[in-house]
């Protein structure tokens, strides 16, 4: 029974493209792409309590892996996805090791440093990384292709996360989040689990980055991976809240679709109206749901259970 | 686990279906998109906000010119509907906007889109869909040199390396013993300019004593200017976008550096920018640049400029003040729009995307908004519409203006 | 304000110094760095000029970093909107000069308006989420960033605007070294505002109450400090400092909606360098970063423009890894 909503969602996702124009298929794929990235951040922050404002950096690395492999080695585009998964996993672990020394706001700023620094590197090493002209994959994909692959990736990544988190590793992660001291004293190796979580989280972001590049016509360019992208992932994670799949979906839809929708609000002209509406809605959502959609879901569930109990007691 | 597997199977199935659909979707559309008996829909992406928003008078002027044409019967009875979208100069925004133009708004052609990276981000997509990407507002040489691979793409203005070659030759002859200091933007734009300068300098390129770079993450260019000053440079060459150009001229004055000659690239040589620099203490007299546009101030009596003034007054009154003060971007927009209308007129009574391109590859016209004597000309083998430039020099200080000198230089590329 | 100060009459007389001390190695290191700058400036005129320009730039980083520190102490978050609030207040000053006010009148009026803006922002959108979720507060500041950007662009447009030069365009020469009045003025105004703030915190009841509210909220409210108001005033003062930073930035990069975005990033680095909770640390961090970046740009060929920001953040990372609480930070780390 627990899987019924998921099955319905999967069927809807599979049928949706046939009801959408190419343009809207593109928008729907970007929801899947943000879903993957936000799920990655959710694993890190929601399960081990480490924060990152630097996931745009891992997306950049993943995106450049895809562009380089396709341009220089004509690797099949789908084959570049596991490759960027692996490479960003290693990068995540490498970042996770020094991150062990930091926590809270200091960790947030250290990862933010990554978000601002990594996009500068292609500009510095423009011979290999294309500089401001960017890199281009050897061929580009259609909307439908992108839709299918990005939602397939979203499903795979979700199942991976689910398998990972429901077992021993997930319990260890949660123990780390709730109390590091208690976790360590009950035999959980903090350094190993924390860096592993960082690796997994970065790997998800890396796959999202590859898809992101495919969504921009196979064009990887430093500006695409600016600070704003990292902030968007963070926004998505906050709107999602922690611990709910539906929350992550809502967060992804929020950051992928709201700019599009707010652009067409006839408030004060498209160009500036978009920012005004987006900022305003974001603030209002956070005021209304400080714990994101997951918090809302939890409240509703509690309310429903409470009502059932109350009725059971009354009858 | 059973259900989970089923979900995966369904999703994998969706991916397979998607893959089949991709292979199936090959057929092209028949009717020409964006074209009706009475209208033609075109669009472009521009930085209306963000770091490059200084250029937003360009699409505004283009719109004004199209409105003027529409009020005079349109082109072959069709009114031009120009869709201006804001990409904030961010290529990741340009891509969905280009898709919006092609797939949602169904434009006939993408016209005048601004910026090199935004152009590079979309030219693969537009060429694959055989959508004309024409009169790109960027001076990189890609648009002119790539006709074989990207037959649906063409630029308009003279290219940057060619312009920089002129500065190199100028410095070589006028200041053979100069110590040259260069400040350039650390991206393809600045690097192409810098490379062109070195080619133009030829054997004198060893006179470059220092070349400094800056980028958007540098809060100021003070350190770079001080370094140039410290290396003893006496000819100052700036290859930058407008704001950093103004900043560097002001900063040079502020750190007490007065080089004997200063050259700036023509993108930043808008009169408004020099006036602003002068008002903030920069020494602007004698600054040299180049131009290919007519001037709305010093050449106000030209028929083209009289027409421009009338169009702006009637169709874009908010632009009038900056037009009268010499905003070259407005003239740029008018000139680019004029070329498009000219090409469209010559694309046949019932133009197609292909006939528009054919027309753009056979231009030979006198655009009333470009500098007198310069022809807008292309051929199947020459994909650069404007290839001539004239040197200009600033005089008159804080209330001064650009004045052309010397002859027209041709085949700038 | 006067009313508020009177109400605070019951604030504790006991001086609760929760100061942020400098450890011996850090102190020695800073002394050595200062000595190096003096010697270098005496030897080379270009070194001297880079140092002075770096100090002027660093003063701006420092002012904004100080604003970040004030907010961090009050709310325990990094305010992503700090730069955009500074930019918006600079536009307000611009509008005032357009209406005919003299520069300095507009300057001080803007500082007042900035204070109100900061307080209003805290009351309206920060306080409701403050005790619910740290992440929510951070996201609200990001939302403010985007909102302010959109509003300013809507009202004033995105093209470059210019204000009258506050210190004129005069250049002084001392030997081979040229100083602009602008640089000297920026440095003086920034340092003056830091000193005023320090005086406020150290010698007034309001300052004492604010420190108490930020550092020991429970105890402070027990002795009658209106903690919530103190936090709002903290936001107000931060906005004032931001306005100073914005107005001092305007003469070098001019007025545009993006003017503070790069500077905010350096201010982040400066604030962390100083320890995030230490006002003095933020200012020293800002000045150090300004000078360091200029000298690296002058003397390290590899460190081209693209690497300036990564270098600033590399410094930040090294400091964090060696001393996770920053140069001036206290040993105890608060849970966030």
Image: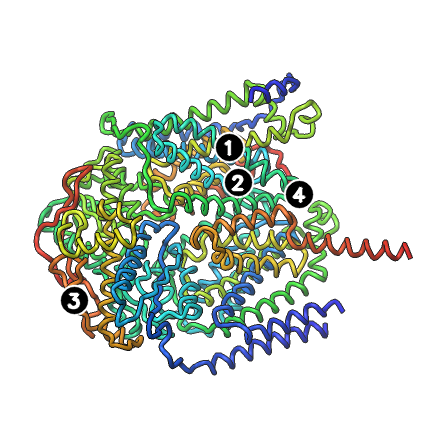
Of the residues under marks 2 and 4, which one precedes in the sequence?
Answer: 2
Question: From the viewer's perspective, is C314 left or right of A307?
Answer: left
The residue that label 1 is drawn on is C238
Q: CA distance from mark 4 to mark 1?
A: 22 Å
State the SS at label 2: loop
Give the x, y percent position of residue C10.
66, 18
Q: Residue at x 41, y 46 (%)?
A: C153
User: Residue at left 77%, top 53%?
Assistant: A303
Residue A68 shows up from this direction = no
Q: CA distance from mark 1 to mark 2?
A: 10 Å
Residue in view at x 37 percent, y 62 percent: B83
- Asked whether the residues under marks 4 and 3 belong to the same chain, the reply is no
Q: Residues within 10 Å of mark 1 (few under 14, many from 20)?
A: many
Q: Which residue is mark 3?
A: B365
| Same chain, labels 2 and 4 | yes
Q: Quadrant of the C terminus of chain A?
A: bottom right
Tell me the subunit letter for badge 4. Answer: C
Q: Secondary structure at mark 1?
A: helix
Q: Chain of mark 1?
A: C
Q: Which mark is residue C132?
A: 4
Label 3 or label 2, whichever lies nearer to me, is 3
At mark 3, the secondary structure is strand
Nearer the camera: disc 4 or disc 3:
3
| Circles 2 and 4 in contact, beta carbons < 8 Å | no
Q: Which residue is mark 2?
A: C79
Q: Nearer the viewer, mark 1 or mark 3?
A: 3
Q: Residue at x 29, y 74 (%)?
A: B151
Give the left or right position of residue C23, taking residue B167 as reference.
right
Local packing at callout 4 (Cα closer than 10 Å; few below 14, some 14-19, many 20+) is some
Q: Are marks 1 and 2 in contact (CB under 8 Å)?
A: yes
Marks 2 and 4, how far apart in space? Answer: 17 Å
Characterize the local packing of mark 2: few (<14), some (14-19) or many (20 or more) Cα atoms within 10 angstroms: many
């Amino acid at each position: 029974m627990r899987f019924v909503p998921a099955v319905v969602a999967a069927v809807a996702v599979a049928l949706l493209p046939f009801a959408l124009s190419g343009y809207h298929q593109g928008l729907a794929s970007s929801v899947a792409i943000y879903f993957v990235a936000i799920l990655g951040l959710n694993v890190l922050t929601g399960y081990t309590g480490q924060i990152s404002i630097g996931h745009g950096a891992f997306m950049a690395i993943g995106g450049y892996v895809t562009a380089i492999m396709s341009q220089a080695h004509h690797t099949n585009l789908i084959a570049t996805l596991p490759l960027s998964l692996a490479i960003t996993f290693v990068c995540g672990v490498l970042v996770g090791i020094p991150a062990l020394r930091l926590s809270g706001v200091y960790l947030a700023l250290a990862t933010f440093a990554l978000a601002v620094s990594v996009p500068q590197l292609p500009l510095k090493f423009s011979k290999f990384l294309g500089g401001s002209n960017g890199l281009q994959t050897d061929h580009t994909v259609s909307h439908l292709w992108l839709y299918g692959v990005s939602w397939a990736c979203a499903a795979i990544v979700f199942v991976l996360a689910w398998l990972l988190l429901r077992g021993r590793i997930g319990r260890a992660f949660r123990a780390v989040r709730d109390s590091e001291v208690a976790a360590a004293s009950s035999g959980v190796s903090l350094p190993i689990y924390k860096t592993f979580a960082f690796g997994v989280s970065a790997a998800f972001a890396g796959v999202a980055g590859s898809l992101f590049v495919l969504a921009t016509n196979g064009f990887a360019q430093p500006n695409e991976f600016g600070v704003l992208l990292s902030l968007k992932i963070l926004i998505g994670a906050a709107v999602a809240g922690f611990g709910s799949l539906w929350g992550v979906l809502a967060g992804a839809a929020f950051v992928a679709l709201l700019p599009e929708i707010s652009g067409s609000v006839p408030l004060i002209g498209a160009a500036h109206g978009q920012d005004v509406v987006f900022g305003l809605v974001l603030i209002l959502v956070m005021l209304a749901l400080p714990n994101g959609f997951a918090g809302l879901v939890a409240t509703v569930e509690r309310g429903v259970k409470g009502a059932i109990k109350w009725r059971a007691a009354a009858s | 686990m059973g259900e989970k597997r089923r979900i995966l199977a369904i999703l994998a199935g969706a991916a397979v279906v998607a893959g089949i659909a991709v292979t199936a979707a090959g057929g092209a559309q028949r009717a020409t998109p964006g074209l009706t008996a009475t209208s033609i829909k075109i669009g472009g992406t521009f930085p209306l906000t963000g770091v490059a928003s200084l250029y937003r008078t360009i699409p505004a002027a283009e719109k004004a010119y199209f409105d003027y044409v529409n009020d005079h019967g349109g082109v072959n009875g069709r009114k031009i509907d120009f869709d201006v979208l804001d990409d904030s100069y961010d290529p990741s925004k340009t891509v969905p906007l280009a898709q919006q133009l092609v797939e949602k708004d169904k434009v006939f052609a993408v016209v005048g889109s601004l910026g090199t990276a935004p152009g590079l981000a979309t030219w693969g997509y537009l060429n694959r869909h055989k959508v004309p990407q024409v009169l790109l507002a960027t001076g990189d040489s890609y648009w002119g040199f790539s006709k074989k691979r990207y037959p649906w793409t063409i630029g308009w203005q003279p290219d940057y390396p060619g312009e920089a070659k002129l500065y190199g030759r100028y410095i070589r002859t006028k200041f053979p013993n100069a110590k040259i200091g260069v400040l350039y933007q650390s991206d393809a734009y600045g690097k192409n300019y810098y490379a062109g300068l070195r080619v133009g300098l030829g054997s004198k390129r060893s006179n470059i004593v220092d070349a400094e770079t800056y980028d958007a993450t540098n809060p100021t260019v003070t350190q770079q200017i001080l370094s140039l000053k410290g290396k003893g440079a006496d000819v100052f060459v700036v290859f930058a976008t407008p704001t950093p150009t103004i900043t560097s001229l002001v900063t040079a004055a502020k750190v007490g550096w007065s080089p004997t000659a200063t050259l700036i690239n023509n993108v930043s040589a808008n009169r408004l920018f020099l006036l602003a620099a002068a008002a903030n203490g920069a020494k602007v007299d004698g600054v040299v640049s180049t131009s290919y546009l007519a001037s709305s101030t010093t050449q106000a009596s030209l028929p083209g400029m009289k027409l421009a003034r009338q169009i702006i007054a009637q169709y874009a009154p908010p632009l009038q003040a900056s037009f009268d003060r010499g905003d070259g971007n407005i003239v740029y927009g008018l000139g680019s729009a004029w070329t498009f209308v000219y090409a469209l007129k010559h694309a046949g009574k019932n133009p197609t995307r292909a006939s528009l391109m054919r027309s753009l590859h056979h231009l030979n016209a006198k655009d009333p908004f470009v500098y007198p004597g310069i022809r807008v000309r292309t051929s199947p083998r020459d994909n650069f519409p404007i290839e001539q430039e004239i040197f200009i020099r600033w005089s008159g200080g804080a209330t001064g203006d650009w004045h052309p000198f010397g002859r027209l230089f041709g085949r700038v590329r | 304000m006067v009313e508020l100060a009177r109400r605070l009459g019951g604030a504790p007389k006991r001086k609760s110094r929760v100061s942020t001390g400098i450890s011996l190695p850090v102190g020695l290191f800073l002394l050595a760095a200062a000595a190096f700058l003096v010697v270098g400036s005496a030897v080379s005129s270009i070194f001297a000029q880079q140092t002075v320009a770096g100090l002027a730039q660093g003063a701006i980083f420092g002012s904004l970093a100080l604003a970040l520190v004030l907010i961090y102490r009050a709310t325990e978050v990094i305010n992503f909107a700090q730069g955009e609030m500074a930019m918006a207040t600079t536009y307000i000053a611009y509008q005032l000069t357009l209406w005919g006010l003299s520069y300095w009148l507009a300057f001080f009026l803007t500082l007042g308006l900035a204070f109100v803006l900061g307080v209003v922002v805290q009351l309206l959108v920060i306080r409701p989420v403050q005790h619910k979720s740290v992440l929510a507060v951070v996201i609200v500041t990001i939302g403010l960033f985007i909102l302010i950007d959109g509003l300013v662009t809507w009202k004033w447009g995105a093209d470059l605007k210019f204000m009258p030069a506050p210190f004129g365009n005069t250049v002084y020469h001392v030997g081979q070294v040229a100083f602009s009045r602008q640089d000297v003025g920026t440095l003086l105004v920034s340092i003056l505002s830091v000193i005023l703030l320090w005086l406020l915190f150290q010698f007034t009841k309001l300052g004492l109450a604010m420190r108490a509210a930020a550092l020991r909220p429970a105890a402070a409210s027990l002795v009658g400090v209106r903690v919530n108001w103190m936090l709002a005033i903290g936001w107000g003062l931060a906005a004032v400092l931001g306005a100073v930073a914005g107005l001092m930035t305007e003469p070098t990069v001019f007025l545009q909606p993006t003017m503070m975005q790069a500077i905010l990033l350096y201010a982040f680095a400066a604030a962390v360098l100083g320890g995030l909770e230490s006002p003095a640390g933020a200012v020293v961090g800002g000045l150090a970063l300004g000078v360091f970046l200029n000298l690296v740009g002058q003397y390290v060929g590899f460190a081209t423009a693209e690497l300036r920001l990564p270098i600033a953040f590399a410094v930040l990372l090294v400091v964090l890894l060696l001393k996770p609480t920053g140069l001036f930070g206290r040993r105890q780390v608060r849970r966030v």
